[in-house]
Image (cartoon, helix red, strand yellow):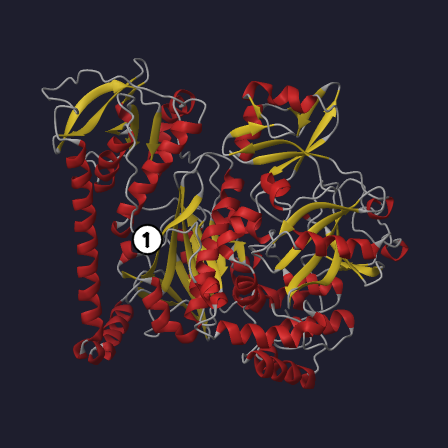
Amino acid sequence: MDNFKKDVSYYKSLGIDTEAARFKRYREVGLLDEVDESFVKEVKEYWQKHYHTKVDPVLHIAFMNLTGKKDPRVAFQRIVKNQFIPFFNDQRMKETYRDKNMYDKLIPSDRAVETVLRRAYGSYFDINNSALYKTDVISNLSSYQEDLIVKPSNTNNGRGIKKLNYKENTLFLDDDKVSVEALEKMYGANFAVQKVVQQHPVMAAPHPASVNTLRMVTLRWNNEIKYLLTFARFGANSSVQDNAGAGGVCVGVNENGEFLDTAINEHCEVYTEHPTTGFPFKDMGKIPNFEKFKEYVRELHKEILHHDLVSWDIVVGADGLPVFLEANFSGATWLYQLAAQQPLFGDLTEEVLEYVYKERNDRKSPRRKTATTSRVRSSVNRKPSPVPKTDYKNENMLVGFMQRLDKPTTLAKSVALMSSHYGMEVIYLRPWDVDIEKGTVEGKMYQDGKWVTVERELPRLIDATDPCFKKDTKEIISYLRKNTVLPYDRKNIPNKQRLQEELSKDENFAEYMIPTRTLDDFEALQDFMKEYSTIVIKPLFGERGRGVSILRKQGDAYILGHGTEERELDRDELLQYFKEVWMSEKHLMQKYIKSRTKQGDPFDCRIHVQKNRKGEWVIAKMFIRVGTNQKVMSNVNQGGGISDPKLFLKANFGEGWENIYQNLKNLGEELPHKVEEMKGTPTMDFGFDVAIEESGDLYLIEANRGGTTAPLIAQSAMLRVEYYQHLRETHPKLKNANVKKKPNKVNSKGNDQGSSMNERINQLEAENRRLTKEKEQHKKEYEKITKSNSWRLTVPVRKVSALIKSKKK
């Protein structure tokens, strides 16, 4: 830190968020060394005049240091991502357009990468979109007798791309012989296999191992498609991927198709030679027929009606003409501008800023409505839709709902009631209720309004909750993995460290990551505190706020907060605490993110996502958790309450609440795809905890298995059952799965002789109404208390009381 020329306080005085990762990224490589205060003033005045907002000038200063140009038109990443992209691009249509399996229908082109195999919604199709049997997939791919590329069909920016190598009449993936099972395990129900494009020598020269592409950006403006900018992306370290998140570098391309002399990577490190091959970028040739490339992407954009701002990945073919690879509807626009060394909107900037501001603030504008309302895929705050009346006759599949509790939970009851309408029976069981030798289970089924004990054959599908995956159940879980379908498997779930490391490499999620390091020794703790005066320390494998502490420096003392308590320690006492507590298991250190209400209580937003009837990720519920009188976390299990996100954000963030709300939904819709890709084992739900700073910036705190607190029960039960049905229809082990009813080993009339189907649905609806009513009553009581005069008047008393308690400690 002492090597930096300017103190952090100086940058703060310029209006720069010095706690943000972007500040540290630019500063560490010297892109903030030179500062022109008159230019900073010009930047602020420019954005205030044309967009009526304050802007953090950090990117403008970095741009100036890199290029020598003082250009106030450079667009700040946060504003582009959170305001411009939702305005220009209809977020409700994003999933449709980004599906690579639909490119030939939605974006037709004679010059596109050839897709030889598609897996869509669990079914296989060949190059002509004719259905394929699973048993014919490998022979179909091998018939091309060449290397191929496999990639997820529903992600962007090069995520998950692998190369299938063809040698000795066999296809290999990561040195292993390719199998359908391996592809399905890695990519799930939706992926594409494409031919390798033969690229032009100009593009291959710096790094021949990857297919290097041009990222070209277009904008629909005043009924015309405008070309904005281009930069080239080159892979590195012999990786097949070319994106910066995989270690690659970006090189700007000018209006004439000539490459700039320098490259930049996602860490803002600048290169004059390729970091892997040493190829000098000054020796790059010119892109042939570059005007045809511009015209090509303009023509492609005419096919996309719902998105006005598009980033195209284009291959320079061996014949020197463009080949369409991929379309992207968001991206790291800060890197676009640094690589291309020009502002995103160029000469259109002033027009764009003024128009977007006007439309976003016009309540009658359809763009304003589109940019701030929920997406089609999101089920936030929606009422459970009526269950379709499907007649499965006697085709009842047995589903196991596994927890470690002796008494079935309300969630288990709700799942059991709803499952019957889909032609499924639910048996509640615990791990030790499985008889491995007999292949049976003894559990409880909900019959005649009560739980009764029965013995059944091993269910074909078992929904096991997180606590079931423990050391004492290892043998049972191993048996279940082989003999049944687990919609969720805890195996390979990323811990906090891996989550931070992987997401930090992805340009789509890096900005949400909190600076993190492992707590290896006491010296590391002291160094981290020099960099961040207040930090959070948490167990590497902890969940739901367990063992989380906050530590800050106050003079020569350290203030340690845990739960609702604080205590003061000197250096020796902190060292002793470090040895006794933090060294007992692995811990992480993170920069403290100030996510607090106007009253000073910590809060976060829980985004609960699940898979639905189509096997797609949707937001089941989003709510704010407030930790009343807590020092660190907002976990309601440790004392606190919950709040509706819209009401809470309006009260705490004023006019900016809509942008924050939309950004939370955007994160909830994008992140599960990435975490599922990292995990690589079956999963059906996640719970993301997100901190919100005063500036409105979002930071991912944790990603856990989705919980089942009271506000979630109705939505979780509905989506769970819908996903069971999806698996029943698509999973090879479950298709047409029937389980004939066996006589129960208790004196019971059985399922069919008890309550009718309508009675079961009525029971579920009554339970949902009761939970909703109870939630609303708690909410009203909480609001009544917090708005009362006694609550306001006793704020000082509560603070003094908390202070006295901490002193007693």
Tell me if I can see residue 578 in this picture.
no
x and y percent of residue 479 in the render?
A: 39, 21
Q: Is residue 163 above or below residue 7?
A: above
Residue drawn 26% across the image and 46% down it: 714
x and y percent of residue 28 in the render?
A: 67, 65
Q: Is residue 148 above or below residue 132?
A: below
Q: Residues within 10 Å of mark 1 (few under 14, many from 20)?
A: few
x and y percent of residue 425 in the render?
A: 25, 27
**Residue 740 lies in quadrant:** top left
Residue drawn 50% across the image and 45% down it: 673
Q: Is residue 250 above or below residue 158?
A: below
**Residue 139 lies in quadrant:** top right
Of all residues, the one furthest to the left in this rendering is 747
Q: Quadrant of the N terminus?
A: bottom right
Of all residues, the one furthest to the top in this rendering is 438
Q: The residue tagged with tag 1: helix, strand or loop?
A: loop
Tell me if I can see residue 678 in this picture.
yes
| Front residue of 206 and 640 | 206
Q: Quadrant of the C terminus?
A: bottom left
Instruction: Tally the marks.
Output: 1
Give, as a three-letter code, the residue at label 1: Arg
| Front residue of 754 and 79 | 754
Residue drawn 40% across the image and 23% down it: 734
Of all residues, the one furthest to the front in this rendering is 223
| Front residue of 545 and 227 | 227
Residue for badge 1: 382
x and y percent of residue 703 in the render?
A: 44, 49
